[in-house]
Image: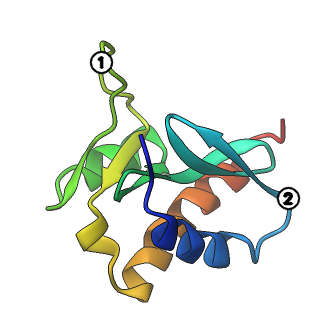
Amino acid sequence: MAYDEALAERVKDIVGARDAVTERKMFGGIAWMVGGNLACGVMGEDLCVKLSPEDAEQALEQPDIRPFAMKGRPPAKSFVLVAGSAVAGDADLARWVDAGADHAATLPPK
């Protein structure tokens, strides 16, 4: 699966300002880790964000947010997909990227 390279560049600009950020290809897209913990990624035209299970559950109540599920598996409790149209604005994108990066920063480094 190809991913939206323009969206990936925008995400990279935001998350790259943090310490201990690495980038790698995964899930058919591209992802960013903070301290070795997954923070966010781009899959297709959508933004994938890892949150706490509680925050993910709350996020799913919003429009344009859906659970992330790999083919043949149940949805992951901590991952959400944010529709690309919902992160067209820089402030909206930064809010979601920061939410994932902030959560990853709370976890023990890997």
User: To which residue does mark 1 refer?
Assistant: 74
Where, by quadrant of the figure, is residue 88 drawn? bottom left
Q: Check the image and tell me how it is coloured.
A: rainbow
Q: Which disc is residue 46 wearing?
A: none
> Within 10 angstroms of label 1, few (less than 14), some, or many (20 or more) residues?
few
Find numbered disc 2 in the image and state the secondary structure of the residue it sits on: loop
Determine the residue positioned at 60% across, 53% down.
103
Q: Position of residue 71 (x, y in %)?
A: 32, 20
- How far apart are the two marked residues, 2 and 1, measured between alpha carbons? 30 Å
Find numbered disc 1 in the image and state the secondary structure of the residue it sits on: loop
Where, by quadrant of the figure, is residue 12 drawn? bottom right
Q: Position of residue 67 (x, y in %)?
A: 27, 39
Quarter occupied by the C terminus: top right
User: To which residue does mark 2 refer?
Assistant: 20
Q: Amino acid at mark 1?
A: Pro
Task: Please report contact status of discs 2 and 1: CB closer than 8 Å, yes or no.
Answer: no
Determine the residue positioned at 38% across, 31% down.
77
Q: Position of residue 84 (x, y in %)?
A: 30, 66
Foreground residue, 1 or 22?
Answer: 1
Foreground residue, 45 or 22?
Answer: 45
Q: Position of residue 101 (x, y in %)?
A: 62, 60
The earlier-in-sequence mark between 2 and 1 is: 2
Determine the residue positioned at 50% across, 78% down.
94
